């Protein structure tokens, strides 16, 4: 496929693109949601019930992300290299809260489900870079209130971030790629339909297997993302 014929390439990534970097996906075997109840650690109600448990869950994931073993893989790098050389517009929408796209060098990233290395003040909604743990005695940098911070993560029942920008990109794109996402979580699972039907974009899914919304795509490329994604961008 000749990629230079496209004007605006939009890529949606999910947990599968970071699997080969050592970060667990959510719904695969041994995924995060097999060991934890979603309603306990990924809902506003769960946070209100037990802030310590929720903070510890994200502390653990933050520490893992910052450990030397976790680094961008060849799929992250291929996307960043493509963006750097592409003449048209490139938009990377990610559901991932890790910073592996940023570390690989991607620039136009929309982190729709928040960022693990950020926290937010519960009173003012101010956002802070955060690399350490959060406990009930951690003072908030803006209001100084102990326990006044929450992870900057979009939980179930909350509205994803940057929806206006996302909608605008989807309606404008002519190539839409979804990489390593199960197509089970909305609104992200609907993006392919907007790109395909509103923008008449060509749509391709990269996954190990058929996703829940696989029939919405024109084309599927099966295999581990760190192999298929670089191949796609070098061969095309
Ligand atoms: N290469 C390509 N795809 C892979 C790989 C890999 N190496 N490993 C796993 N996958 C695929 C799986 O087959 C699965 O379809 O990645 C997908 C991961 O799906 P999920 O675990 O459901 O992750 P995701 O789609 O990102 O979840 C969406 O749900 O839990 C919430 O907010 C959380 O952002 C997350 C959202």
Image (spheres, helix red, strand yellow):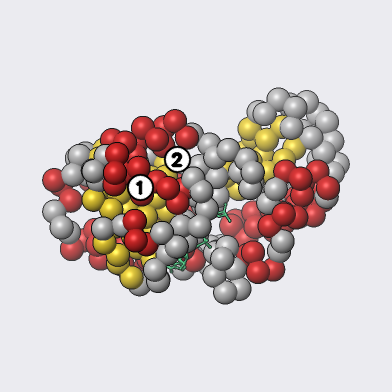
Q: Could you say where residue 36 lies in the image, as x and y percent from the top left?
A: 71, 64
- Which residue is at the front of the view, 144 or 92? 92
- Reading the image, the residue beneath label 2 is 110
> Callout 2: helix, strand or loop?
strand
- Reading the image, the residue beneath label 1 is 193
- On screen, 183 above or below 120? below
Distance from mark 2 CB to nearest ligand 1 atom below 8 Å: no
- Which residue is at the front of the view, 228 or 117? 228
Residue shown at 36% from the left, 49% from the top: 192
Earlier-in-chain disc, 2 versus 1: 2
Give how far apart the Cα atoms at labels 2 and 1 are: 19 Å
Residue 166 shows in the view: yes
Q: Could you say where residue 210 lies in the image, as x and y percent from the top left?
A: 39, 68
- All told, the count of numbered labels is 2
Q: Quadrant of the C terminus?
A: bottom left
Residue shown at 57% from the left, 63% from the top: 26
Q: Could you say where residue 196 lies in the image, as x and y percent from the top left?
A: 29, 47
């Amino acid at each position: 496929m000749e990629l230079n014929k496209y004007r605006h390439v939009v890529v949606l990534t999910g947990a599968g693109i970071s699997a080969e970097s050592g970060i667990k996906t959510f719904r695969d075997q041994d995924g995060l949601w097999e060991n934890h109840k979603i309603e306990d650690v990924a809902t506003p109600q769960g946070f209100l019930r037990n802030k310590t448990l929720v903070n510890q869950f994200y502390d653990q994931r933050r520490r893992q992300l910052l450990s030397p073993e976790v680094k961008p893989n060849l799929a992250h790098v291929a996307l960043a290299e493509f963006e750097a050389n592409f003449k048209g517009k490139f938009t990377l929408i990610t559901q991932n809260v890790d910073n592996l796209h940023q570390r690989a060098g991607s620039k136009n990233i929309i982190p729709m489900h928040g960022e693990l290395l950020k926290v937010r003040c519960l009173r003012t909604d101010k956002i802070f870079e955060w690399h350490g743990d959060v406990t009930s005695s951690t003072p908030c940098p803006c209001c100084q209130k102990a326990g006044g911070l929450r992870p900057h993560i979009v939980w179930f029942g909350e509205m994803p971030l940057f929806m206006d920008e996302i909608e605008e990109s989807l309606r404008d794109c002519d190539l839409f790629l979804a990489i390593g996402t199960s197509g089970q979580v909305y609104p992200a699972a609907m993006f392919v339909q907007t790109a395909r039907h509103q923008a008449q974009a060509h749509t391709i899914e990269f996954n190990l297997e058929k996703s829940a919304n696989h029939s919405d795509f024109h084309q599927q490329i099966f295999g581990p993302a760190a192999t298929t994604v670089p191949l796609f961008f070098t061969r095309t």
